[in-house]
Amino acid sequence: MSQNSSNPKKQSAFTIWWNSPKGKKVINAIYSVGAGVVIIGAMFKILHLPGANVVLGTGMICEAIIFSLGALDKPFKEYHWDKIFDFENGTTKFQTELIGSGTVSAAPNLPHINYSETLSEEDVEKLSEGIKNLSTTAQQLASVSDLTTPTSDFIRNIASASESVSNFSKNQNNLNASLHNLSGIYEGIGTEMRKAEEKSKDYTGEIEKINKNLSSLNAIYEIHLKNVEEQSTKIGISNKELEIILSNLKKINSYSTESAEESEKYKNETIKLTQQITELNRVYGNMLNALS
């Protein structure tokens, strides 16, 4: 194998930091802060607060930058769980190619074992017991007759095979338990995801209700503003009319004052006229008396 294929490509410091837990934590914080700015900008826009366009624009720019950085994320590794789990029937199955296949050459008097077939737990236990019994029988034969060294080696190999099968059985049981636990975990994750989806739908419904209520409040507020403007216009017209009435009242008051003065003058002149007539009558009476 060549040197280029044996040595992996060296990653840059930025790539190492980007894929590290600390880098992920920082990026997640940036995601959250950017989303918060967008939500605040949307709130400013809905409530018609000053500076809404600036805040919303800033938040959208932050999100655009963050999503652009998301292009640097390393794609997730996909595992072929369908080779282990039967999702259609809800059962666990094992693919023999994941464990290994092949045949083991057996002794002349031992049955042929094909490990490419899937062994159940019961078959493994029976196989383990059979090998143990065979080991015990071989030891008894060795004690009865003085066999050669290959027989002892054969016995040790049989015992080792028995122990290996026993360990294989334990490992298979542990694997089954782990897969069962993993299946339960995935079921729990699926349940939580369904709950989260339902909560998201509820949250969306509540947001729609809030938007409808805000729209209704805006419409009512606009109607109220129109009524206030109309009332203000009417009040202004009434004030002008009142000013005109007050001006006319002032004129009437002025005319009344002038009339009172003229009446007083007329009264004085009438008194003078009466006095003059009385004096004239007195003179006229004296003249008549003198003539008579």
Image (cartoon, helix red, strand yellow):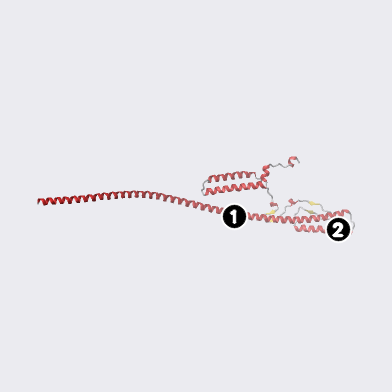
Residue contact at pointers 2 and 1, CB within 8 angstroms? no
Q: Residue at x 23, y 50 (%)?
A: 268
Q: Which amino acid does label 1 sit on?
A: Lys
Q: Which residue is drawn at 29% across and 50% down?
A: 257
Q: Nearer the viewer, residue 236 or 224?
A: 236
Residue, disc 1 = 199
Q: How far apart are marks 2 and 1 (CA)?
A: 68 Å
Q: Which residue is drawn at 68% across and 42% down?
A: 13
Q: Which amino acid does label 2 sit on?
A: Gln
Residue 118: image x %, image y %?
75, 54
Q: Is mark 2 on a helix, strand or loop?
A: helix
Looking at the image, the residue that sits furthest to the top is: 3
Q: Is residue 89 visible?
A: no
Residue, disc 2 = 139
Badge 2 or badge 1: first in the primary sequence: 2
Mark closer to the observer (2, 1): 1
Q: How many labels does the image show?
A: 2
